[in-house]
Amino acid sequence: MQKLTPREVQVLSLYLEKGDLKPVAEMLGVSIHTVRSQRNSIRKKLGASSQVELTLEAIRRGLVDLGEGER
């Protein structure tokens, strides 16, 4: 299993929070193509073939904060 870089963890966290590439790209000041490429790299490293699998693997591996959120 390959380890995610700090930037990939950041992209993963933002992507799962926002649910779309465009806001992540805007927040990071990069193109959508860059974020898509990073997401694809993350998927390969985590062995995820879908958004659901990506989310589950991120949770399983403790890569995202499952805080209480807003109420």
Image (tube, rainbow, N blue to C red):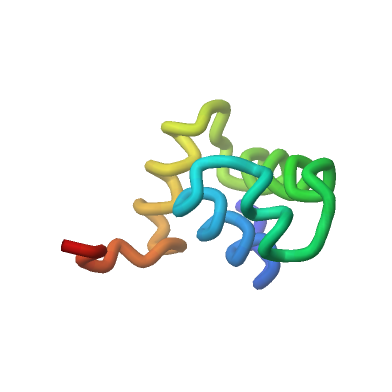
Would residue 39 appear left or right of 17 to someone viewing this image?
A: right
Name the foreground residue: 17 vs 45. Answer: 17
State the residue lying farthest toward the bottom: 6
The x, y position of residue 45, in whole percent, is 65, 46
- State the residue in front, 44 or 67: 67
3 displayed left or right of 58:
right
Q: Looking at the rendering, in which quadrant would you find the C terminus?
A: bottom left
Tell me where residue 62 sits by quadrant: bottom left
Task: Give the answer, above or below, for where 33 lies relative to 2.
Answer: above
User: What residue appears at the point 69 percent right and 68 percent down from the top-left corner?
Assistant: 7
Quadrant assignment, res 69: bottom left
Rendered location of residue 57, percent (x, y): 43, 45
- Indicate whether 24 appears above or below 43: below
- Please give the name of the residue rendered at 43% of the width and 43% of the height, measured from the top-left corner: 55
Residue placed furthest toward the top: 49
- Residue 33 screen position, x and y as percent: 83, 41
Is residue 1 left or right of 41 when viewed as pictured? left
Using residue 2 as the reference point, say whether residue 51 is left or right of it.
left
Residue 2, percent from left and from top: 66, 55
Q: Using the image as rendered, state which of residue 41 and residue 36 is in the foreground.
A: 36
